[in-house]
Image (tube, rainbow, N blue to C red):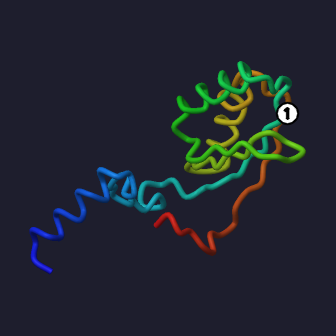
Amino acid sequence: MSKTPCQVRMRKLVDSGVIQGFRAIVDPASLGLDHVAFTEVKLSDTREQALSEFNRAVQRIPEIEECHMLASSFDYLLKVRTADIRRYRVVLGEKISSLPHVSSTSTFVAMETVKDTSR
């Protein structure tokens, strides 16, 4: 396939939203960020306004790589990446626990990543 048809096909995929973007994939460990914790968060209020406030606040914490609202015994699951457990403790205590409407958290520390399709 020549370059021009490839470019046309790629532009169509981008324009239609099939391809949502392009990015560089950086090895977090090479940046000293190889500590991963998953944090369950339970909110004290789950009305729409409270959820929106929580969602907006999560966006401002760079250590939170992912945030998922769940149908579970807790409300959100966060993937948090830091340099080490000491830094995670600071992020949990000063940032995550201070998010709007957080009533409790529970942490699970990842020992090894077996599969990660985002890479």
Local crowd size for mark 1, using a 10 Å CA cut-off: few (<14), some (14–19), many (≥20)? few
Q: Residue at x 73, y 46 (%)?
A: 77
Q: Height in image: 102 above or below 41?
A: above
Q: Residue furthest right?
A: 73
The spot of residue 113 in percent (x, y) is 62, 69
Does residue 1 appear left or right of residue 23 in this picture?
A: left
Identify the amino acid type marked 1.
Ser
Q: Nearer the viewer, residue 11 or 110?
A: 11
Residue position marked by numbered label 1 in the rendering = 104
Tell me the quarter of the picture where residue 101 sits. Answer: top right
Q: Height in image: 92 above or below 118?
A: above
Q: Nearer the viewer, residue 88 or 2?
A: 2
Q: Nearer the viewer, residue 47 or 44?
A: 47
Does residue 23 appear left or right of residue 48 in this picture?
A: left
The spot of residue 90 in percent (x, y) is 66, 35
Tell me the quarter of the picture where residue 2 sits. Answer: bottom left
The spot of residue 107 in percent (x, y) is 78, 48
**Which quadrant, please, contains the N terminus?**
bottom left
Q: Residue at x 70, y 61 (%)?
A: 110
Q: Residue at x 29, y 50 (%)?
A: 15
Q: Secondary structure at mark 1?
A: strand
The spot of residue 24 in percent (x, y) is 33, 58
Q: Residue at x 64, y 35 (%)?
A: 91
Does residue 11 appear left or right of residue 108 in this picture?
A: left
